[in-house]
Image (cartoon, rainbow, N blue to C red):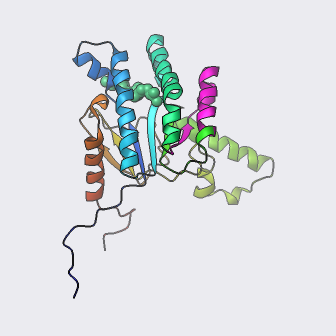
C-alpha cells in the first residue's frame, strides 16, 4: 500500500489580481521627503510585485497607476508621475519582455503626451505574443467613463443597425470595455488602509474579493502579496449562491 502524504496541496493563486497602489504621499511625508520620493519608491514596489506575481504564477496583474481623477493633482506632481511612467517603460521593457511578460494598458492612454503614447504602443506590440504574466497598467483610467463610452458605442451600433437591442447582454457589454479579453479580477487589493474602489474596475470587480491592507504602497512586498492571497484563499467564494 502506498503511503498517503500529509503535505497540504498548495492552493492555486487567483488568476487575476488587481491592486490600487495607495499611500506613496504618506510614506514620503512620514520621512520628511517630497511626494515624488514616495512615487519613486512606489515604482520600486511595483517592480517587486511584478516579480512576485511571476514567481507565484499569477496570470494577470492589474495596477492602478494613474486615474482619470489624478489630473486634479498639482501640475508638478502630474509631471512627476508621467516622468516615472516614461522612465519605467524606457528602462524596463527589455527585461519584462525577456521574462515573457505581456504588457497591456487600460484607460485613455492615447490622450497622454505623444512620446508616452508611442512607448505604450511599442510595449504592447513588442510583448503581444508573450505567454507569461499579463501586466495591465491602468493610466488615465476611470470606470465611469469606460462604462459610459461602452454604452455610447453600443447605442451607436444599435442606431446604425449593426446590433439589435435584444442582443445586448452582459457578455457583449463587457466586450466594449477596455478589459476586453481579460478575465475579471478575482482579488482586488488596496493599500494604505483606505477602503474604497475609487472608480477602479467597477464592472469587472463585481465578484472579486476585496482585501484592504494597512501597509503603504512603497512598503508593499512579496510577503504582503502572499498575505493578501492567503486572505483570498480563506474566504468562501460563493458567487451569490448559498453555501449548501
Ligand atoms: C497613490 O499614492 C499612488 C498613485 C497616485 C499612483 C501610483 C503610482 C506609482 C506607483 C508610480 C508610477 C507608476 C508607474 C507605472 C511607473 P498617493 O499619492 O495617493 O498617496 P497618499 O494617499 O498617501 O497621498
The residue at 52%/33% (across/down) is 93
Q: Quadrant of the C terminus?
A: bottom left
| Residue closest to the eye, 194 or 87 | 87
Magenta residues (range) = 100-125
Of the 4 image quadrants, the one containing the N terminus is: bottom left
Camera-side residue: 239 or 57?
57
Where 60 falls versus 110 (above or below)? below
Q: Report the residue at 31% width, 27% height from top.
A: 23
Image quarter for ligand 1: top left
Residue toward you, 133 or 30: 133
Q: Position of residue 153 (x, y in %)?
A: 69, 43
In which image quadrant can residue 108 be found?
top right
Residue at image position (67%, 41%) is 152
Left or right of 59 on screen, residue 114:
right
Q: Position of residue 158 (x, y in %)?
A: 75, 50
Residue 147 on the magenta span: no
Visible in this render: residue 141?
A: no
Instruction: Place residue 43 in its image quadrant.
Output: top left
**In the rendered view, would you say 166 is above or below 130?**
below
Amino acid at each position: 500500500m502506498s503511503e498517503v502524504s500529509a503535505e497540504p496541496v498548495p492552493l492555486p493563486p487567483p488568476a487575476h489580481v488587481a491592486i490600487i497602489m495607495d499611500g506613496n504621499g504618506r510614506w514620503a511625508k512620514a520621512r520628511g521627503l517630497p511626494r515624488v520620493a514616495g512615487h519613486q519608491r512606489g515604482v520600486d514596489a511595483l517592480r517587486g510585485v511584478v516579480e512576485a506575481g511571476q514567481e507565484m504564477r499569477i496570470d494577470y496583474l492589474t495596477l492602478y497607476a494613474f486615474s482619470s481623477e489624478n489630473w486634479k493633482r498639482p501640475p508638478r506632481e502630474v509631471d512627476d508621475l508621467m516622468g516615472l511612467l516614461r522612465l519605467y517603460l524606457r528602462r524596463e521593457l527589455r527585461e519584462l519582455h525577456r521574462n515573457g511578460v505581456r504588457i497591456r494598458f487600460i484607460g485613455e492612454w492615447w490622450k497622454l503626451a505623444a512620446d508616452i503614447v508611442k512607448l505604450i504602443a511599442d510595449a504592447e506590440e513588442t510583448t503581444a505574443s508573450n505567454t507569461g504574466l499579463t501586466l495591465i497598467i491602468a493610466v488615465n483610467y476611470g470606470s465611469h467613463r469606460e462604462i459610459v463610452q461602452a454604452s455610447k458605442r453600443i447605442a451607436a451600433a444599435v442606431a446604425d443597425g449593426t446590433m439589435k437591442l435584444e442582443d445586448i447582454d452582459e457578455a457583449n457589454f463587457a466586450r466594449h470595455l477596455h478589459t476586453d479579453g481579460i478575465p475579471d479580477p478575482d482579488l482586488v487589493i488596496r493599500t494604505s488602509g483606505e477602503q474604497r474602489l475609487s472608480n477602479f474596475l467597477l464592472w469587472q470587480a463585481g465578484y472579486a474579493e476585496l482585501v484592504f491592507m494597512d501597509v503603504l504602497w512603497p512598503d508593499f512586498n512579496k510577503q504582503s502579496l502572499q498575505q493578501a492571497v492567503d486572505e483570498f484563499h480563506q474566504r468562501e467564494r460563493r458567487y451569490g449562491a448559498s453555501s449548501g
